[in-house]
Image (tube, grey):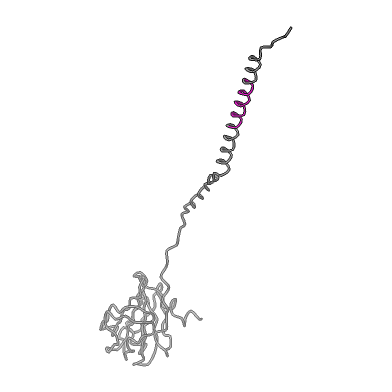
């Protein structure tokens, strides 16, 4: 007696297993390809640039800058050879033997022979040339910053005119033979100076007095 088996079922099972195997292989292949592509894109992509933050601006600091002051002008003596007569006496009355009364002496008298050359004590601009009765010829020089010098007891023939710019040591005139306001002292230059309209002692500016 022969026994027969139903081979169609076995064959169907084998086919199903193959399909499952192929499906799994295909799925793994797709996943592997996807992984490879992802890794390739990730590794091949340049790293994003890291932005360095800009440094904060320097703080603004208010600094008090002192104003630039004009340099002090250089001073020279008003003549080469002289003898100091009366010094300045701005706060104390002194007796004038020429005028016979007491008064302040607002400048320094430089005794010298008539005709001695007189120099500008500092650079500046001539603002006045006056022929007076009591003080002979008078020259005024503006040195800037409110400082003026006055040269009294000069001859009528002077070396400058109003508006002239002069340097320190420039010849401006000569000593007269007589200055009526101070005639008892003989020929001399009477030098006065003012700062901001007030008399100051020329000795505070002239080098020969500063050296003592």
* Residue 22 lies in the magenta-colored region: yes
In this rendering, the answer to whether 187 lies above or below 124 is: below
> In the visual, does 13 lie left or right of 209?
right
Q: Main secondary structure of the magenta part?
A: helix
Image point 43% across, 77% down: which residue? Answer: 205
Q: Which corner quadrant of the image does residue 4 belong to? A: top right
- Counting from the top left corner in percent of width and height, residue 67 is at 42, 63
Q: Which corner quadrant of the image does residue 92 belong to? A: bottom left
Q: Which corner quadrant of the image does residue 128 belong to? A: bottom left
Count of numbered circles in the view: 0
Image point 39% across, 78% down: which residue? Answer: 94
Please tell me which residue lies in front, 98 or 1.
1
Magenta range: 16-29
The outermost residue toward the top is 1
Please tell me which residue lies in front, 14 or 106.
14
- Counting from the top left corner in percent of width and height, residue 33 is at 58, 35
> In the visual, does 19 lie left or right of 154?
right
Image point 28% across, 77% down: which residue? Answer: 127
- Counting from the top left corner in percent of width and height, residue 187 is at 35, 90
In this rendering, the answer to whether 81 lies above or below 166 is: below
The outermost residue toward the front is 1
* Residue 193 lies in the magenta-colored region: no
Please tell me which residue lies in front, 146 or 57.
57
Q: Quadrant of the N terminus?
A: top right
């Amino acid at each position: 007696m022969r026994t027969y088996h139903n081979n169609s079922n076995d064959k169907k099972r084998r086919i199903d297993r193959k399909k499952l195997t192929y499906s799994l292989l295909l799925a793994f292949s797709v996943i592997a390809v996807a992984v490879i592509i992802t890794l390739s894109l990730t590794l091949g992509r340049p790293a994003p640039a890291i932005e360095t933050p800009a440094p904060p601006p320097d703080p603004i600091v208010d600094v008090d800058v002192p104003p630039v002051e004009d340099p002090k002008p250089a001073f020279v003596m008003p003549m080469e050879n002289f003898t100091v007569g009366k010094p300045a006496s701005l706060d104390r009355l002194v007796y004038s033997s020429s005028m016979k009364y007491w008064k302040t002496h607002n400048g320094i008298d430089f005794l010298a022979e008539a005709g001695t050359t007189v120099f500008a004590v500092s650079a500046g601009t001539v603002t006045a040339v006056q022929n007076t009765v009591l003080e002979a010829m008078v020259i005024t020089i503006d040195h800037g910053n409110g400082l003026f010098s006055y040269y009294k007891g000069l001859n009528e023939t002077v070396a400058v005119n109003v508006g002239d710019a002069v340097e320190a040591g420039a010849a401006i005139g000569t000593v007269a033979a007589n200055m009526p306001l101070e005639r008892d002292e003989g020929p001399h230059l009477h030098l006065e100076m003012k700062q901001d309209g007030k008399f100051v002692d020329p000795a505070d500016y002239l080098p020969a007095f500063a050296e003592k």
